Image (tube, rainbow, N blue to C red):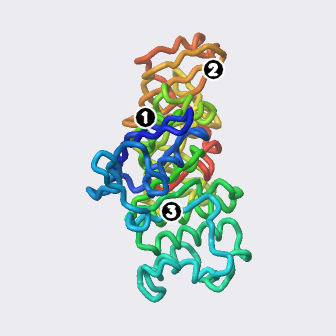
Amino acid sequence: MLEVAIQHRLGAFALDATFVTTARITALFGRSGCGKTSILNAIAGVSRPQSGRIALNGRVFLDVAQNVCLSPNVRDIGYVFQQGLLFPHLNVADNLFFSKRLSEDTPQARRLIELLGLGALLKRRPRDLSGGETQRVAIGRALLSNPSLLLLDEPLASLDAQRKHEVLTHIEQLRDEVGIPIVMVSHSIDEVIRLAEHMVLLEDGRVKAAGAVDELLARLDLAPATGRHEAGAVIDAEVASHDVEHAVTLLRFDGGELTIPRVVASPGHRLRVRLRARDVSLALQRPVDISINNILEGTLLEIRDEVGAIVDVSLRVGEARILARVTRLSLGRLRLQPGQRVYALVKAVSIDRHSVGYA
């Protein structure tokens, strides 16, 4: 369990952040300048807040009131920055084992190298690596220091889409196999949805909300902070079957079924699927003879009625909450109101690979 309760003022900026998390991956999310990296630096011991307390599994890193502040080198924390920051004069192997906490011939080290796909890179110098390879080496170096906690400060920010997908896949594998808790900073809601279980939403140095990713993204009141254009819901679903002929995968969750473009996952695997509000339409009756494959019956819960042409609504489908975005014209024409039974229509092609991650 990671406990953070810190306060710090730097000029006009005031950081006042309190949260507790037990998740495998916790995401600090918010706009630039909201305090995300400042929190990471405080956890790592790179900076010292003016007041507060930080503890991991009962071990106190910082308690200003008790005059406790462990130095970074004894906190056992791995830290990965945006640019990787490898030593240019060392090859990959020497970078990986720079801390000398684990030797190259240990089973743990060999498994990490395998998980990160670094076996063929060990003799290369940093100048000969791609951006994605550099970040994988940086993550491996941090993990081979045998940390109790891993901090990732926007490690994908400088990567193109292909390299980002590559590194995301490796982080997913680490999350599922290594067992070290991770706190990551991100400004990409796609990354948060794909990787994190818990999100700390920051705004102007304060925690606006904290909790499970699916719960926070389904809240209409948080849409301005999470990004209204990208607002949506996350469904935890199980792979039911694959239709090879039509290249689609059938998912099941407690609210029904979803057909999506085919994914590489065996039946029984659990996936997290993002449904963007802008990709969800509503109907009062179940439509027939329609190209849309996903028709989910639910109950309308809430309408966020703001000024303008667009209106966001939330609905309950099974145990899940789904968001839909409609025009004010449609809201009036359909006479939508809380408690109403409706059908959510979701095009399968709107659920691309960036919208699906392993649970």
Q: CA distance from mark 2 to mark 3?
A: 42 Å
Which residue type does callout 3 highlight? Tyr
Q: Position of residue 325 (x, y in %)?
A: 59, 26
Which residue type does callout 1 highlight? Ala
Res. 310 mark: 2
Q: Earlier in the sequence, mark 2 or mark 3?
A: 3
Circle 1 sits on which residue? 209
Q: Earlier in the sequence, mark 2 or mark 1?
A: 1
Vertical relation: 86 (above or below) 209: below
Q: Quadrant of residue 307?
A: top right
Asked if disc 2 and disc 3 are in contact, CB closer than 8 Å, the reply is: no
Q: Position of residue 129 (x, y in %)?
A: 70, 74
SS of the residue under disc 3: strand
2 or 1: mark nearer the eye: 1
Circle 3 sits on which residue? 79
> Which residue ends up furthest to the bottom in the rendered image?
105
